[in-house]
Each structure stands twice: as C-alpha cells, then as structure tokens.
Amino acid sequence: MTASLTNSRNGFQGIWPAMLTPLDAQLNIDHRKLAAHAQSLIAAGCGGVTIFGTTGEGPSFSFQERKEAVEQLIAHGVPAERIMVSTSCAAVTETLELTRHAVDQGVHGCLVLPPFFFKGISDEGILNGYCHIIDGVNRKDWRLYLYHIPQVIGVSLTHGVIAELLKRYPGTIAGIKDSSCDRAHSVALAQAFMPPLTVYVGFEPDLPTMGPMGSTGAISGLANFMPRIVHRMVLDPHAPGTAHDAQRVDSMLNMLKPHSLMPALKSVMATLHQDPSWLRVRAPLVAMTAEAHAAFAKEVLQFNIDPKHE
C-alpha cells in the first residue's frame, strides 16, 4: 500500500484514519502517543490522519486542548499537510477560531459539521453557519470538507445547502464526508456532486460501491488498526481479495456492534498494543470495565488481525 497525496485543490486521496485519541491517567491528551499513532499509520501507507472527529471524541475536548494537540502533532514530526482537523464546536465562533488556527498551521484541510446544537434549524441557518466560518477564515488556500452524520448530531446537510456552498465557494469546498451509514444517500451525493467534489464515506462496507464511482479515499475508524484492508476496499475494489476483505470488515463490525463504539475501538487498540491505557475515554463516554475488556480482548485475539496485511 502506497501513500497518495493530492497537490491540487481537490479532495484528498488514500486512507486518512479517523484517529482515536489516547489519554493519560488524568484523562488529558497523550500527545506523544497520539503522534506515534499518527506516524505509524502514515508509515503503513495512509495518506494522512484525521483528528478530533467523532471517533476521536472531538467535542469532548476543549478549544485550547484541540489547538495544542494540532501544534504538538506537528512538533512531534507529523507533517502538517498530512493532518485533517475536525474543527466542529457547538459555537460557530469557536469553530471559526479552531479552523483559522488549523489553517494557519498548514494542515491539509478541516472537517466541519453543520451547526448542531439547535435541532430543526432551516437550510438558511445551516448555510449562514458555514458562511460565517468561510468568510471569517477569508483565505483561498485551504480546503473545507463538509461532514454529514445526522444520526449523531441530529442535523442533516441537504443537497440544497451543499449546492449553494459549492456555488459561493467553489475553490474552498473540497469534499463531503458522509457518515450517515446510508448507502443510497452516499450514492445520491456522489451522483449529484462528484465531480467537482469528492464524496467519502465513513461506513467501511460502502467503500467498494463508492470507489468505482470516483471516491478516492476514506476517513475510517477501523483504519486505526486495519488501514491496508480499508485502502484496498476503496481504491482497489475489483481486486481478487476484495470479497474476503469485505467479509473481514463485516466480521469486525459485528464484533463491535454489541458495545459502545469508541470504547470498543479503544479496547481493540489496548489489546493489539498490550497497553491498557488505550481504554481511557472522556466523559460522557464510559470506558470498558476490566472484565468486559478481558472478554472482548479474547475475541479480538481470535480475530487475528495481521498488521502487515490488514
């Protein structure tokens, strides 16, 4: 698997894992471990990494913590152009400030949710939120990725809003991350907007459908520990082993399904790295108990993830 970057103003290529965020004993971000995880994923062939999305518990960290984490990643040797930052906050003004900060650091792009605290808001309200951010950054040299995950935030990103943003800011909107886990919705987005935008999905079983439509990569939670298999599913969907890869992904998702997702993903990392500190999560998430982790670890070990192949 080879890393692939884009030099155009278009969307990214390759796998940019939605990184889990390691915490120390005081539940602060473990910057060294976060950077080491990012570097290991890039060394495995990922195009870059994504921090502070849903998988990374982004909204559970403060404004200042998220700024510091970007700076520390870069200081620890992770190239800024290989970092995607989810800058979404409940307050649009804070989203703007985090976005400005990330752009000033030279990151590849920013992943931004629609304004999400109030529910039932109009398309006009959502559009105004995005315009506030883009006009506030007031630069031409950055990429904004729209983030659609309505089952988590309770707010949808409609075709009308996307079309209007693309019309107003054609050089800024680079792509859409559709984490709705609704294949028909992802396909409809691709048919409507790709190109010029690229549609990326977060639900790994949809990757073989999106790749042939022109999707050039993915932001994936499973890629924290299965980056190569995710890479093949989206960028080489017709390879002889793709059916087997899809079965492996389905099996892993079925294994995770009975559990709260982020604590379970962290349990996988704790098992694979033999490092129980990976179990730590920020409130309101609740970490797996020692007993639950021990039982789940047996399943993970039996699953037998091959780090050189998967």
Image (cartoon, helix red, strand yellow):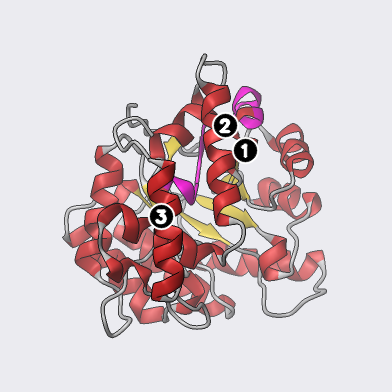
Say if 59 sits above or below 111 in the image: below
| 2 or 3: tag closer to the N-terminus | 2
What's the CA distance linking mark 1 and mark 3? 24 Å
**In the picture, residue 246 is in which quadrant?**
top right
Q: Amino acid at mark 1?
A: Pro
Residue 227: x percent and y percent?
40, 39
Q: Amino acid at mark 2?
A: Ala
As rendered, which of 306 and 1 lies closer to the eye?
306
The residue to which callout 1 is attached is 205
The residue shown at (73%, 57%) is 157
Q: Is residue 54 visible?
A: no
Query: Disc 1, disc 2: CB below 8 Å?
Result: yes
Residue 49: x percent and y percent?
37, 49
Say if 92 sits above or below 298 in the image: below
Q: Which mark is residue 78?
A: none
The residue shown at (45%, 33%) is 229
The residue shown at (33%, 81%) is 27
As rendered, which of 157 and 237 lies closer to the eye?
237
Residue 136: x percent and y percent?
52, 68
Q: Which mark is residue 298?
A: 3
Q: Amino acid at mark 3?
A: Lys
Say if 298 sits above or below 289 in the image: above
Say if 68 sits above or below 219 in the image: below
The residue shown at (55%, 55%) is 256
Tell me if residue 210 is in the magenta stretch. yes
What's the CA distance linking mark 1 and mark 2? 7 Å
Is 61 situated left or right of 129 in this image? left
Q: Residues within 10 Å of mark 1 (few under 14, many from 20)?
A: many
**In the picture, residue 183 is in which quadrant?**
top right
The residue to which callout 2 is attached is 246
Specify the segment rendered in magenta.
Answer: 209-223
